[in-house]
Image (tube, rainbow, N blue to C red):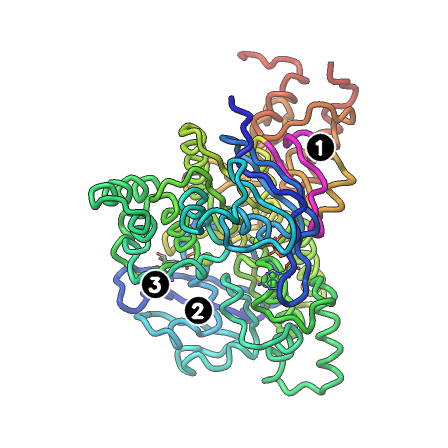
Amino acid sequence: MNNPIVEFKNFSYIYPKTEKIVLDGINLSIYEGEFVGIIGCNKAGKSTLCQSMVGVLPHLLGGKWDGDVLVDGINLGETKGAGATDVIGIVFQDAESQFTQETVEDEIAFAMCNFGYERSVMRERIISAATDCGLIDMLDRSPFKLSGGQQQRLAVACILALQPRVIILDESTSQLDPIGRDEVFNLVAKLHQQGRTIIMVDHNVEKIAEYVEKLVVMDKGKIILADKAEDAFQKMEFLEQFNIRVPQVTEACLKMKECLEIDKAPIKLENAIQLLQIKLEGTNFE
Amino acid sequence: MSENVIIKTSKLVHTYPTGVTALKSVDVEIKENEVVSIVGQNGSGKTTLVRHFNGLLKPTEGNIYLHGKDVTSQSVSQLSKEVGYVFQNPNHQIFSTTVRGELEVGPHNFQFSEQEIAKAIKEVSELMKIEEDLEKHPLTLDYTTKKIVTIASVLTFRPRILILDEPTGGLDQAGREILTKIIQMMKERGHTVIMISHDMDYVAENSERIIVMSQGRIIKEGAPQEVFLDEEILKQAQIEPPQIMQLDFALDVRKKRSTISVQDFVKKYKAQFPKQEGE
Ligand SMILES: Nc1ncnc2c1ncn2[C@@H]1O[C@H](COP(=O)(O)OP(=O)(O)OP(=O)(O)O)[C@@H](O)[C@H]1O
Ligand SMILES: Nc1ncnc2c1ncn2[C@@H]1O[C@H](COP(=O)(O)OP(=O)(O)O)[C@@H](O)[C@H]1O
Ligand SMILES: [Mg+2]
Ligand SMILES: [Mg+2]
């Protein structure tokens, strides 16, 4: 197998002026072209993990750390974080805090500036990303005078225009309307098909289950489960102990396991419909 | 069950200084002691609407009445005591240097005694499980904890109307359970909750009534079961029913009484299978 594009080797981290071990001996390999979902309850360390993939932690923010993070073979500890953002683009959980420009158009362009694109290419990508994210009518608006969901759409558009090899979305759909959320998942799925590596942190397990291949589950700074999504979500009782839900259709089917005579529950809506339609054939809901 | 209207708007229009008209003639009534959710696509005007309820925004045209009195005749401090608003973005709401300080602001402004303040902080921080964060600087908190602190800082002054703008965004299961407890507590006290959310599972299970907005207008109001059955409205407002409801709709074409929770679903469908041995 090729080398991982992101690799954690026994990585631990403590924020500055605190004592709590926030990442605790993380070992994780993500390969180019994978679609990975990261779930876990609040404070599990998901955002901290994402930020350490781009070298923000520990190299910009400080704090104590141990172990290694490698991005495309570069050891971030040796380069003090340099090199990571050539490969990885991240949308932070707090979208608004990453805006610096006066218009939506400039904000999207700003992300690309450092990469020396030609003007015409930049313009094309801005238009296409803004259209995809439903912002095309707002190019001259201030990023700070958008609704919460529109700001999140803008943060996503910046990354889509950049098209880095690895895309990390840290809860970037949490304030989107349901259709907007679908659109973002569809957009990154399209990029995934073109060979990009996608890492999504999201509490919406229904959407995660529809799209990701590999699921990483975190609790208290540790990875407690990393498996194919369809296998990981079977462990409903295990996940419940960590306050993590499984998709509604999976929960329903697992709770009707005996009636349905199944070993494994579907994790996607479409598969649940198929399964139940067969099992219910002839029923007319009296 | 009182049917008293507590908030009412009449032909409410709001145009921002940038020229964007976010509300186009909104007539809405909120009843005392109800738990109502506002849903709708990004930019449809939800935040703009509720910000008029506590005086943060002034109408460009039209009126807002609280207990039948036009709010323009009431002072902002009076309004904000009665109507507690939790911002969509917690960074816009936090100004103190400790979490405790943040929780004290409201009760302090509204002249609570020292004893009352201490009691309120104890009660709320226990309920929201932030006792250990009280002496921390809000800037050192992760995003979700900040959000929880902003909810707590409104609860400490016991508003009769609680407005939660996108409280579920980023909350895990434990956080949602705390939120549900808060809603129940408000309900039991006879108070009113207005919640904005894109989380349809949560909305379906936790609201008595849903208001749907699209492009600055209200396009539908009703009970969750009713609203989620209206495909035309759902499409217009860019929303979709919870996954379990979608499964129910696909299987039971009568679409009469839909199930809004997994529990309902399992109960309904288990009954379709012959009884298992030993049951
Ligand atoms: N401060 C502002 N200045 C100018 N326009 C604004 C401002 N805030 C919001 N708007 C615009 O007003 C409209 C309604 O925004 P509002 O924030 O009320 O939407 P919302 O329904 O709360 O959306 P979301 O679900 O994304 O939070 C949008 O077109 C938005 O871009
Ligand atoms: N800037 C910070 N300073 C100090 N501690 C932090 C900071 N950000 C997060 N933490 C702490 O690190 C832990 C993990 O947080 P985070 O990575 O945000 O978790 P998640 O994204 O899974 O909710 C939490 O205990 C949180 O309080
Ligand atoms: Mg996070
Ligand atoms: Mg809003």
A176 to B95, vertically: above or below: above
Q: How packed is label 1: few (under 14 Cα within 10 Å), some, or many (20 or more)?
A: some
Q: Earlier in the sequence, mark 1 or mark 2?
A: 2
The residue at label 2 has a CB less than 8 Å from ligand 2: no
Say what amino acid the circle numbered 3 marks. Answer: Thr
Q: x, y percentage for residue B98?
A: 29, 59
Residue A243 appearing in the image: no
Which amino acid type is marked by label 2?
Ser
Please report, as a chain letter, where disc 2 is located.
A
- Which secondary structure, mark 1? helix
User: Where A230 sits versus B17, above or below?
Assistant: above
The magenta region covers: B209-227
Residue at image mark 2 = A52
**Which x, y percent locates residue B169?**
52, 50
Q: Is mark 3 within 8 Å of ligand 2?
A: yes
Query: Which residue sits furthest front?
Result: B73
Position of B229 with respect to A149 (left or right) is: right
Q: Secondary structure at mark 2?
A: helix
Q: Secondary structure at mark 3?
A: helix
Q: Is residue B15 visible?
A: yes
Q: Tell me the mark number nearer the camera, choosing from 1 and 3.
A: 3
Instruction: Give the residue number, with chain letter if any, for mark 3.
Output: B140
For the residues beneath circles 3 and 2, the answer to whether they share a chain is no
Mark 3 burial class by Cα count in 10 Å: few <14, some 14-19, many 20+: some
Give the Cα separation between the discs numbered 1 and 2: 41 Å
Viewer-proximal residue among A22 and A171: A171
The quadrant in which residue B156 appears is: top left
Provide the residue designation for mark 1: A275
Residue drawn at point x = 50 percent, y = 74 percent? A71
